[in-house]
Image (cartoon, helix red, strand yellow):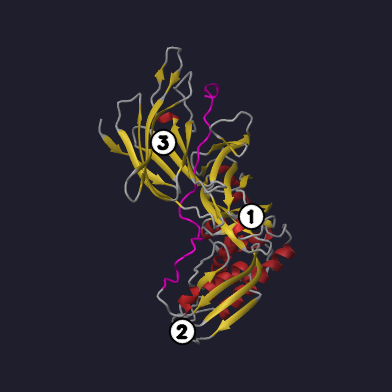
Amino acid sequence: MKAQKGSLLLLFWCIIISNALSLGVIINFNRFNTQDNTPYTEFYISVIGKSIKYQKKTDGLYQGSVEFLFLIKNANNNAVVYADKFNLLSPNLKDTTNIREDFYFTDVKRIELSNGKYRLEIQCKDNNKTSDVQKVTSDFEMDFNPKEVKFSDVSFLSTFHKTTNKNKFSKAGYDMYPQPNAMYGDNMDTLAFYTELYGVTNKVPKDDPILITISIGSRGSNKVLEKYVHRLKKTATEMPIIILDRFVITDLISQSYFLSCIVQDRSGNVIAQTNVGFYRHSTRADKLFAEKNLAKSVNLSEDNIINSYSERELNMYLDALSYISDEGEVAYAKALANVDEKRKFLYNFWLKRNDNDPVRSMRAWLEYKQRIDLVNEKYKSQLRKGYLTDRGRVALTYGLPNDIQVMPRENNTYPHEIWYYYKLNGQANVRFIFYDKDYTTNDWRLLHSDLYGELQNSRWEAVLRGKTVNPNLNTDNNILPGNYGSNPVIVPRRPDEQ
């Protein structure tokens, strides 16, 4: 039987093995550590129930079987450090003619691996089909430093509950059943997740308070959604800190999101952070969003100042609103066809943010418009309007800073400004560093910020001195990742649930 390479899709430690005619498998692996610094991986192997052939047994029930060969090799010398060959059996089914799309059967493997680089090689085949063996490989790294504060990978869960009878899905006192992928459809209104935090006492005295902020944000705008923020007060300990939580995501519209975890000490300093992406598809939420934002439903009085704006002004104002809009609003605004709809959308944008109070909503808009006018005048360049520059974006997104330190060209450094925010998005003492590299256009670029989710470059001082360092390089790896996150698997259903 010849070996055939299946399609490979890496979704931040998720491997999907499939081809058009046969076996469908999802393999998720997450990296964890222990108090005594013994790293290990958890592999969740899930077979898509509709993709396999079932064999009728002597008792009249049907069962599927998939053979797996797991090899983990040292990436440096190709030495095999783990090998396992096993059959994964489906539950016994009474009928295989109407298997649901979301039916998976799952196994879990926990494997100790020391720090280092590895290559995972997997072979699998349907034991009840004369089919080709599917093969896939993926490189990964174990990197746990006991002197660092660090999160484990984040596991998305379909459900969890307290353990009554310990089983292979039991961990930290709970039975946790992983989600097969990071795609949340119409019938999935809860996002549950699990992660662990290590080494807190490397940065915080033992028994000192820490704050863990968990949030959901839009990947399109890179903004946290205020409705989806949980804050957990914990105490610094040498033990791994368990984070098991859930969000109700009924109102999330169809788009890409990120789940973020940030740890701060008592002074508000960020000591560790992680994030992972997921995708939401909800026709129900999309419909409600469209109804809520329907510009035609707004009653805009004739004497409202918004009616005096030309279409050119409206286009600029709606563009400037994108910094404080969610991804759905941005897409909706771009699709507006005429001036009347644009005026009503602008009015409704502020109205719904101010409890439908016309006076408060117009006051809020005029304050924001004043900021637009300010940045357009102060930060305009030869290339762009002020609101489109980096300084303009930051001022419109976060408000004007508490203090600005202006540094002209001196001591062989580029001219630069350091903006200080005493407190911003729950972080203390946040800085934004902008610099002027060409001296002529006034198009100052953001070089570094302490704010989570913004561009971070720990070598920003070297850049200012003219050293050869890519100023757009996010050396601290804190920009949101481009992949969807750790994707464990849905709990297998009992035969009587088919």
Mark sitting earlier along the chain (3/2): 3
Q: Mark number for residue 439? A: 2
* 122 lies above or below 360: above
Which residue lies at the image location 48% right of the left edge and 21% below the top edge? 92
User: What is the quadrant of residue 204 in the picture?
Assistant: bottom right
Percent across and percent down for residue 223 are 58, 59
Q: Which residues are magenta?
A: 469-498
Judge whether residue 352 is colored magenta: no
Percent across and percent down for residue 112 are 47, 42
Percent across and percent down for residue 173 are 62, 37
Mark 1, residue position: 213
Q: How many marks?
A: 3
The one nearer the camera, 110 or 8, is 110
Which residue lies at the image location 57% right of the left edge and 82% below the top edge? 406
Which label lies toward us, 3 or 2?
3
Q: Is residue 322 left or right of residue 107?
A: right
- Is residue 172 at all visible to an observer of this figure? yes
Q: Main secondary structure of the magenta part?
A: loop
Q: Mark number for residue 370? A: none
Mark 1–mark 3 distance (CA, rounded to whole Å): 34 Å
Judge whether residue 478 is colored magenta: yes
**Helix, strand or loop at mark 2:** loop
User: What is the quadrant of residue 6 in the picture?
Assistant: top left
Q: Is residue 428 left or right of residue 111?
A: right
Percent across and percent down for residue 331 are 52, 57
Q: Amino acid at mark 1?
A: Thr
Mark sitting earlier along the chain (1/3): 3
Which residue ends up furthest to the left in the rendered image? 2
- Is residue 388 at all visible to an observer of this figure? no
* 323 lies above or below 112: below
Mark 3, residue position: 25
